[in-house]
Amino acid sequence: MRVIGVTGGVGAGKSTVLGILEEDFQAYVIQADQLGHILMEPGEECYDAVIALFGKEIIKKDKTIDRRRISDVVFTDKDMLLKLNGIIHPAVKQRILDLLGEQKEAGREICVVEAALFLEENYQEFCDEVWYVYTEEEIRIRRLMESRGYSREKSLGIIRNQVSDQVFREHTDYVIENNGDLKGTRRQIREGIERNETL
């Protein structure tokens, strides 16, 4: 089974790439952020630890955790962010490894793992190769303003806070330019899939 890691900055259009891999190549897609949310749900393994860290005031009426309140806290408190990551990231990693094991057993040919903090959390350890989705900064700003309603300043602040283009390129195996030409993106994904077959 081939495991492809997919990373890139916010607003790069990683979900478009994941969708094409799923649709055209029957890839099983695992998104670390989504798993992180699932692991904080009632009955899941991070639920009690997160409440112990932030206090009972983060519990909503339906017993779920108020993620917005958490993000407000960690946005200004780096120490709390580190502690939260210390709870969530190891659990997410383990869940990904479990899912990869299940898919391998089921005979899946391609699995894709996507994570925002891919390089920082060393997700490449269990991937055969890592793809970087690159998009020009202005396009990313426009996407964030349109899809999330962010101001230009907030969008720029988030982008500048992330790993630089140079670092991404130095630590990944294949680059997909995703500047809005869907046909071009599809072609590059196909080339990326075929590239491995000729290596």
Image (cartoon, helix red, strand yellow):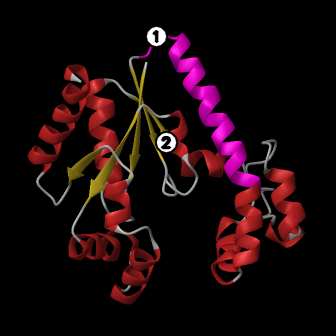
**Category of crowding for the residue at label 1, using alpha-carbon neighbours closer than 10 angstroms: few (below 14), some (14–19), many (at least 20):** few
Mark 2 or mark 1, whichever is nearer to me: 2
Left or right, 162 with reference to 198: right
Residue 150, picture quadrant:
bottom left
Q: Amino acid at mark 1?
A: Gly
Q: Is residue 180 in sight in this rendering?
A: yes
Task: State yes or no: residue 94 in magenta.
Answer: yes
Is residue 74 depicted above or below 91 in this figure? below
**At label 2, which amino acid type do we have?**
Gln
The residue labelled by disc 2 is: 124
| Viewer-closest of 188 and 14 | 188
Q: Nearer the viewer, residue 39 or 171?
A: 171
Which quadrant would the C terminus be assigned to in this image? top left
Q: CA distance from mark 2 to mark 1?
A: 22 Å
Res 11 visible? no
For label 2, count other residues whose C-alpha is less than 10 Å away and answer few (under 14), some (14-19) or many (20+). some
Label ID, residue 23: none
User: Any mark on residue 107, and which?
Assistant: 1
Q: Which residues are magenta?
A: 87-108
Which residue is nearer to you in this view: 197 or 90?
A: 197
- The reply to whether the magenta stretch includes residue 74 is no
Relative image position of residue 190 (x, y in whole percent): 18, 32
Which residue shows up at 88% across the image and 70% down it?
A: 55
Coordinates of residue 3 in the picture (x, y in percent) = 43, 29
Q: Secondary structure at mark 2?
A: helix
Quarter of the image containing the N terminus?
top left
Q: Main secondary structure of the magenta part?
A: helix
SS type, badge 1? loop
- Identified at 59% across, 21% down, the residue is 101
Q: Position of residue 160 (x, y in %)?
A: 40, 79
Q: Does residue 100 sit above or below 35 in this rendering?
A: above
